[in-house]
Amino acid sequence: MKQLVQDFKTGELKLVEVPPPAVAPGEVLVRNAFSLVSAGTERSTVEMGQASLLGKARQRPDLARQVFNTLKREGLAATLNKVQSRLDQWKALGYATAGTVIEVGAGVTEFAPGDSVACGGQDRASHAEIVAVPQHLCAKVPEGVSLEHAAFTTLGAIALHGVRQADVRLGETVAVIGLGLVGQLTVQLLCAAGCRVVGWDPQPEMCRLAGVAAGEPNSADAVIVAAATDSSEPLEQAAQLCRDRGRVVLVGRTGTEIPREIFYRKELDFRVSRSYGPGRYDPVYEDKGVDYPIGYVRWTEQRNMQAFLDLRLNLAPLITHVFPIDDALKAYDLITGKTQEHFVGVLLQYPTTSSPKLPHSSTPPFPRSSLVLGVIGAGNYAQGVLLPQFKANKDVTLATVCTATGAKAEKTRTKFGFTNATTDWRAVIADKAINTVLVATRHNLHAEIVCAALRAGKTVFCEKPLCLRAEELDEIIKAGSDRLMVGFNRRFAPFAAQVHAIVPPLVMRYRVSVQPLPQGNWYLDPEIGGGRILGEVCHFVDFLQFAARSKPARVYAQGFGANNVQASVRFANGSVGVVEYFEVADAALPKEQIEVFGGGQHLVVTDFRDKGQAEEVRQFVEAAKTGGPMPIPLEEIVASTRTTLAVLESQRTGQAVSLSGP
């Protein structure tokens, strides 16, 4: 299928052929008829992508700080590699579409194939022939409303939430500053609410289109700022227009230096309107489909979308351009100013009879002696660390890469030289030409995919953690796990051999200092990522087992919060080890430090740079190709996984946990 993307490394806009998305539980698969180009938001996105590396850093100082901290911990080469890998991506554009449902995922009851729907959401309702959108980011299009007009719904919900934040009353005077597309929609909504509307825009024709006159100072009960500028001047203007104790609502993107004197003198109420409404940026609402009770949250983002559609506003005067998807780049020439032409609403139109390319299996004849690799999941770690190692190995043929979105799958295919790209991981498992599978998805999918791959007779490399629950581990063992490898790479680091040479029993201490992850990061979700203890502490538990040359026998853990733990492990041969994992230290503290005592020797390793990934992949490829034993014995993989699960149990109960074999 066709999709519009931006190469974030070069800034180039491209219309590319990508695999269509596979529908997941809680999602709706929609064939788009129209998508709306949001001039303000998408122009900013495109300009950032086209900026230099320094320009990107200036626009995102938070990311620049992360890069600086990585530089201090890991050195210049590793940092540059991470930065280049993260920049070398395709970014999906667009977040407002309308079309027809062609399939629904498990758990979806509000929609059915054939329904006309409006869709929203960055990286969801993209400029693409087919999109997969969570059900709470969809709304049914009422009979009589065209899909052309329904494509405005996302921006309409943004405008509607701004009106709700302004708390307007029938007969009040409301000023709208900035009469671009969101401003135009805001004017129509205010008129429908029985308000007297005044407005301002630097382009007089926009005031004429909205049908509003300029407002007088001290006349407005509320002012809605829908402008887009780095200046704080719109807030100063809003304060001038407001009466005493009036309300100023910021919907657009402007500077936020509030002029204190006039806000104080008039005792103005300043409010910020967050996107489409309650539920936005909440993964529990958007991704997991858990609704807010209507008695407590009357207007969620989905209910705002539906309300906008039900109003049946006259949107025809706002549509100035409609481009077929094949001419999508012309739309961006328009909104970025390359084409000097007046515009308001710019739509992309999609063919209704297209037959998008479906995920397909490998067909070329691969060398018989080759390790034919299928990759499921291609996030930052896979692309920045694992895939370069597999690609560099002459014994590996890169067959198919699978990711959740078609754009990412196709970009990864071209970047690393895979033969095929798909969004359906089951197609990788079903491909008989593929004899080896790398699983690098989000953690909640590891166990299901590993079991399917093992039962299909594949050799499997699963990035850690292997699973999130004990019952999943039991299923993996039943699946026949002798061809299984897990990415516990620390034991393959250069210093590991020196540690392994110390005669046990040992006393060991592994201290790990990490920085907090952003709120809402999938890693912290107990159902998806499992948290940092399952996702990362497993590494260090495995290394202690490797160093001790013995299975863990007993675990006691204590800590605070979800990500700060001290876990003490006693091994069957008498060795003892402690993993201290925390996110409360200064970022300048070296991330990892290992101390090992035994046999009259003392070894200290501080913040090593080579964490063993290259050697780990080399040994795995050799074992997979020759049919030899896996680099990590199955019983050790199982023991490390059970021990990490026991760390969580001990921390929860406050009791030590005794361990037994598989």
Image (cartoon, grey):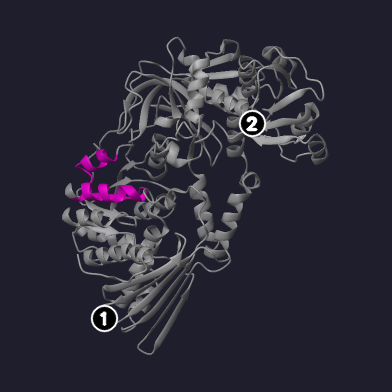
Q: Is residue 426 magenta?
A: yes
Lower position in the chain sequence, tag 1 or tag 2 = 2
Q: Residue at x 71, y 12 (%)?
A: 208
Instruction: Inspect this view and state whether residue 11 appears.
Output: yes
Q: Position of residue 528 (x, y in %)?
A: 37, 48
Q: Secondary structure at mark 2?
A: loop
Q: Is residue 161 left or right of residue 306?
A: right
Q: Is residue 657 magenta?
A: no
Say the numbered circle drawn on residue 251.
2
Image quadrant in which you'd find residue 625: bottom left
For the residues labelled 1 and 2, say whether their Cβ atoms are less than 8 Å apart: no
Q: Is residue 507 left or right of residue 328?
A: left
Image quadrant in which you'd find residue 39: top right
Say the numbered circle drawn on residue 525.
none
Check the picture and name the quadrant holding the N terminus. top left
Which residue is labeled 1 in the image?
573
Q: Which residues are magenta?
A: 425-454
